[in-house]
Image (tube, helix red, strand yellow):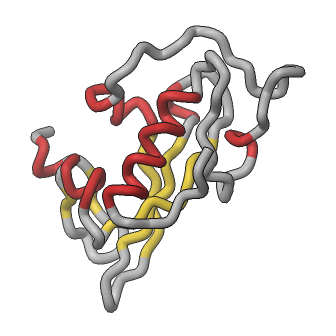
């Protein structure tokens, strides 16, 4: 798979590059769903926001490893006493301040939103 064929819209079948997913206003980030420490089960949710499509789709978080520009901590703090519980709610867009496995992916979500001028609450 090359960069031009990073993800295909399941409805209109348009191919998106990684850059499209990261920055295009046609691809709107909706949030993250973290289920475990397994990258395959942690999903970024997007909407193909063009007239005639408006389909939602998912991309496993492991597909974004090449653009995570920080170390990924091995510890999973989700559900612990010091967990801020952001990753438990897909509509929560606040950054995680813990040294947690999920935090770098949340920060990537926030960067994607800001690339599109989507308001993200300061954290």
The residue that appears at 36% across and 83% down in the rendered structure is 53
Instruction: Say which quarter of the image contains residue 9.
Output: bottom left
Residue ranking furthest to the bottom: 52
Determine whether, in the image, residue 110 is placed left or right of residue 90.
left
Quadrant including the C terminus: top right
Residue ranking furthest to the top: 74
The front one of 80 and 96 is: 96
The residue that appears at 42% across and 40% down in the rendered structure is 108
> Whole-percent x and y of residue 75?
65, 11
Q: What number of labels is visible?
A: 0
> Whole-percent x and y of residue 2?
10, 40
Instruction: Say which quarter of the image contains residue 121.
Output: bottom right
Instruction: Say which quarter of the image contains residue 37.
Output: top right
Determine whether, in the image, residue 82 is placed left or right of residue 53.
right
The residue that appears at 60% across and 52% down in the rendered structure is 93
Determine whether, in the image, residue 42 is placed left or right of residue 85.
left
Quadrant including the N terminus: top left
> Whole-percent x and y of residue 29?
45, 59
The residue that appears at 36% across and 72% down in the rendered structure is 48
> Whole-percent x and y of residue 35?
67, 35
Q: Is residue 38 above or below residue 18?
A: above
Residue ranking furthest to the front: 122
Q: Is residue 105 above or below residue 8?
A: above
């Amino acid at each position: 798979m090359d960069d031009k064929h990073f993800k295909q819209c399941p409805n209109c079948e348009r191919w998106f590059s990684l850059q499209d997913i990261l920055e295009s206003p046609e691809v709107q980030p909706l949030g993250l769903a973290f289920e475990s420490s397994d990258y395959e089960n942690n999903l970024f949710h997007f909407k193909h926001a063009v007239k005639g499509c408006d389909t939602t789709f998912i991309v496993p978080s492991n597909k974004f490893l090449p653009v995570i520009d920080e170390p990924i901590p091995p510890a999973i703090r989700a559900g612990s006493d010091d967990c801020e519980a952001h990753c438990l709610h897909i509509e929560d867009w606040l950054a995680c301040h813990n040294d947690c496995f999920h935090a770098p992916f949340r920060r990537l979500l926030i960067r994607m939103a800001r690339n599109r001028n989507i308001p993200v609450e300061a954290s």
